[in-house]
Image (cartoon, helix red, strand yellow):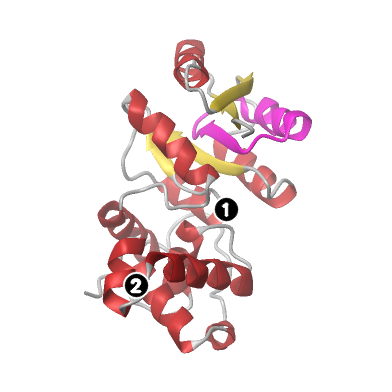
Amino acid sequence: MRPIRVVVADDQELVRAGFGMILDAQPDIEVVAEAADGAEAVEAVRVHAPDVLLLDVRMPVMDGLEAARRVCADYPGTKVIMLTTFDIDDYVFDALYAGASGFLLKDVRRDDLAHGVRMVASGEALLAPSVTRRLIGEFAARRPGSGERPARPPSRLLEQLTARERETLVLLARGLSNAEIAAELVVSEHTVKTHVSNVLAKLGLRDRVHAVVFAYEAGAVVAGEG
């Protein structure tokens, strides 16, 4: 099986090198390039076509947010994970709007770093369900704040989904894992995965994180609902 190809972008050489060594030591992960700023990160993605880009939020020349926008728009095959020193960071919310698939704190444990890369590469949610719910709930509540935001997606897009697919979307947005959704709907986990894949395809979404964002944005659920 081909290893997960990763580019690491951070303006701090020790951070960049440390993350690179940790990931390169994994048998199923290969670091194909490093970048010291956002412009280098975008170029590295163009040249190497990695599966995952680890991208620092704050970098010189081109910041991580602009780099995320460009990579997500021009290279949809590359999933973006933002690196930050803050657990709730306005730039991270903007990065999620730009198309990033989640974020990791820079003090992440080495096992969690590798696990996060694997999760995002496979299209699964990077964050634990409880954290996803808190993050996306606050993210949705901050929507009127700083930064350019896209228009609210029309709720009619939800009409493309079957009743069961819409139920799956709502449960995703409430922070349930595949196993919990399966139990709630009394179906197998394989069936849940099929529903999730159908939701992503029909709505044109990159991954589970963005399915959650869409659910809030389209009004399928409301931030803070139980």
| Residue found 34% across the figure and 28% down from its top | 111
Q: Residue 7: image x %, image y %? A: 61, 28
How many numbered discs sit on the rendered protein?
2
Please tell me which residue lies in front, 104 or 11.
104
Q: Residue 189: image x %, image y %? A: 39, 65
- Residue pointed to by mark 2: 171
Is 94 on the left-hand or right-hand side of 180? right
Which quadrant: the C terminus?
bottom left
Write the start and end of the magenta stretch as one range: 37-60
From this view, report whether residue 81 is shown above or below residue 174.
Answer: above
Among numbered discs 1 and 2, the one appearing first in the sequence: 1
Whether residue 201 is visible to the viewer of this picture, yes or no, is: yes
Q: Amino acid at mark 1?
A: Gly
Q: Residue furthest left?
A: 226
Q: Residue 83: image x %, image y %? A: 45, 33
Q: Amino acid at mark 2?
A: Leu
From this view, report whether residue 217 is shown above or below residue 31.
Answer: below
- Residue pointed to by mark 1: 99
Q: Secondary structure at mark 1?
A: loop
Quick check: is 53 in the magenta stretch? yes
Is 71 on the left-hand or right-hand side of 108? right
| Residue found 58% across the figure and 66% down from its top | 150
Please tell me which residue lies in front, 87 or 226.
226
Q: Secondary structure at mark 2?
A: helix
| Residue found 54% across the figure and 27% down from its top | 29
Q: Disc 1 and disc 2: Cα gap in Å?
A: 21 Å
Q: Which mark, residue 129?
A: none
